[in-house]
Image: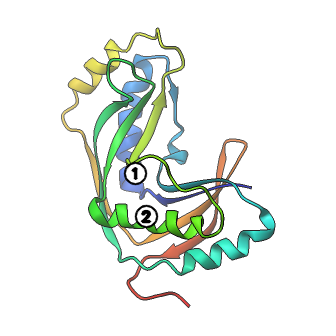
Amino acid sequence: MRLFIGIALPDPVRSNLRALLNQLRPLADLRWTPLDKLHVTTKFIGEFPEARLEELKQALRGITAPPFDISIRGLGWFPNPHHPRVFWAGVDGGDPLRALATATDDVTARLGVAREDREFSPHLTLARVKNPTTPLESIRRGVASLPSQDFGSFRAATFILYLSTQGKYTSLAEFPLNSAPKT
């Protein structure tokens, strides 16, 4: 089973991102992320044995974290604008989001999942550059002409264990955020 942990986006934020993607998609031949796949990843697990799925769910139930606010704003390129491979929207959840990412990393590490080796950098992958010679100036002009790069805010009250199969994401379990241990 190919798994990851993330936070779903609410409809108003999705609607704002849909408008952005509709505006930018015609400007460059990129591999655009389908809207229904946009989420805030806190931990990529990768392959995990199905026989241990309940053990993983039980471990995730033990995470204690309060609900917190997330803002989706700003656009950019990984690794940098001069050699772009990924076009992204910024995710700002501050210390609470970083704490949740650390908690999911800690819990899954105790189950044998490799720890993250990179600093947590929350973002939404909007598109991937298919060909390094793809001209991106039209996207840059499109971004520069936007009236705002603020795509909305929301209160994260849950996190989700997702299954990824053949390009489709399925929610396997949803866990509430609260400050008391779950039993």
The residue depicted at 65 percent of the width and 68 percent of the height is 111
Q: Few, some or many C-alpha atoms within 10 Å of disc 2 (few <14, some 14-19, many ≥20)?
A: some
Tell me where residue 88 appears, x and y as whole percent.
38, 36
Residue sticking out furthest to the left: 147
Identity, as a three-letter code, of the amino acid under mark 1: Phe
Residue 76 spot, x, y in % from top left: 31, 32
Q: How is the image coloured?
A: rainbow
Reading the image, the residue beneath label 1 is 120
Instruction: Identify the residue shown where x is 43% and y is 76%.
Output: 177
Instruction: Count the numbered circles shown.
Output: 2
Q: Is residue 15 left or right of residue 127?
A: left
Disc 1 from disc 2: Cα separation:
9 Å
* Furthest residue toward bottom: 183
Q: Describe residue 8's horizontal placement relative to residue 81 as left or right.
A: right
Instruction: Kindly indicate whether the residue at mark 2 contacts the one at mark 1 (C-beta within 8 angstroms).
Output: yes
Residue at the image point whose x is 51% and y is 62% from the top: 105
**37, 20: nearer the viewer:** 37
Q: Earlier in the sequence, mark 1 or mark 2?
A: 2
Residue displayed at 30% across by 35% down: 75
In this figure, which residue is indicated by the disc labeled 2?
102
From the image, which quarter does the N terminus lie in? bottom right
Image quadrant assignment for residue 180? bottom left
Give amino acid for label 2.
Thr
Tag 1, which secondary structure?
loop
Give x and y (percent) for residue 35. 50, 42
Disc 2 secondary structure class: helix
> Which of the 4 image quarters holds residue 148?
top left
